[in-house]
Amino acid sequence: MSYERPADLARALALRAEGGRVVLAGGTDLLAATTARELAGPVLDLTAVAELQGVTLSPAGLRLGGGASWTQVARAALPPACAGLQAAARVVGSIQIQNRGTVAGNLVNASPAADSVPPLLTLDAEVELASVRGLRRMALSAFLLGPRRTALAADELLLAVHIPAAALAGQGAFEKLGARAHLVISIGMAAVRLVAVEDRVGAVALAVGACSPVACRLAEAEAGLLGRPLADLPEALDAAAVTAALSPIDDVRAEAAYRLAAAPELLRRALAACAPAPEIAR
């Protein structure tokens, strides 16, 4: 088995363009799925490529390097809008997995239950893809095509995830439902980002994961909350609009009907976490 660990992006992209190489970043999905004593085929190890690293906040927004670990995301000094993303980062597997697993790995694996996707959708995230042909960017929602399917071309690497400055307003929250608190694949999960304007909902983003082939934003349910008094939350959520947007399946973790019942409740809990607590009259 041949092995290459390039120190710069240009070399990594040249090797990627040759084809036939197994891409290794954190390795937490790749190695777990390998039953042989070694990885099949030539290995392209990306852990030394500086352009894939870092969690960087700037006036333009937030950049998550594709090779950044979930521990780095969880520990970064980020605005409250990213609280949901950071909460999700803290439940991606175990602490050991969070230390090794990468932002790009969680996305290119394209699991319907990927914990990072719902909060990233509420943050209007875009992915930046790199190849020897150049760079291109697209919305995360367009990148994820279905279970284990993405828009990543065979010669591309997921260089970074970008969150625009406008999406860093407000308060974020994340709720996960599983058989236990950690080391579990989600039965369902929900993320919310809420922007309050004079005690009303000025803007809101809602997303649900593990209840459809890909996690999705809930445009109709969002529209129903705009302008509503914060005091009405979370009861103002239209559960019918939530379930109408979902298409869960029965599997070993839960039945579809259970997921449909759980999704609105998870969103209500996330909304309650985002909305300021009402003042108590003295």
Image (cartoon, rainbow, N blue to C red):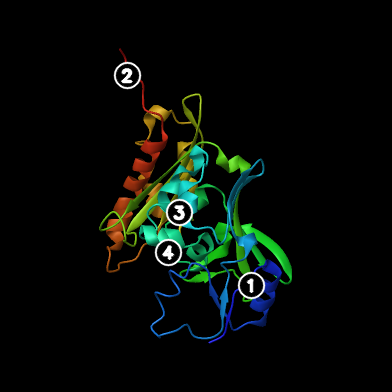
Crowding at label 4, few (<14), some or many (≥20) Cα neighbours within 10 Å?
A: many
Give the CA separation, mark 4 to mark 3.
Answer: 22 Å
Front of the two marks 3 and 1 = 1
Task: Report the label total.
Answer: 4
**Tag of residue 6:** 1
Identify the mark nearer the N-term, 2 or 3: 3
**Measuring 45% from the left and 43% from the top, which residue is drawn there?**
83
The reply to whether the C-beta atoms of the residues labelled 4 and 3 are less than 8 Å apart is no
From the top left corner, tell me how far across and down residue 197 is, in percent. 52, 28
Which residue is identified by label 2? 280
Give the CA separation, mark 4 to mark 2.
Answer: 41 Å
Q: Is residue 162 above or below residue 96?
A: above
**Tag of residue 71:** 3
The reply to whether the C-beta atoms of the residues labelled 3 and 1 are less than 8 Å apart is no
Give the CA separation, mark 3 to mark 1.
Answer: 24 Å
Q: Is residue 97 left or right of residue 203?
A: left
**Which amino acid does the dot numbered 2 rest on?**
Ile
Crowding at label 3, few (<14), some or many (≥20) Cα neighbours within 10 Å?
A: many
Q: Is residue 225 left or right of residue 93?
A: right
Element assignment for label 3: helix
Q: Is residue 137 left or right of residue 94?
A: right
Give the CA separation, mark 1 to mark 4.
Answer: 31 Å
Identify the mark nearer the N-term, 1 or 4: 1
- Quadrant location of residue 187? bottom left
**Tag of residue 112:** 4
Q: Is residue 217 visible?
A: no
From the top left corner, tell me how far across and down residue 273 is, in percent. 38, 37
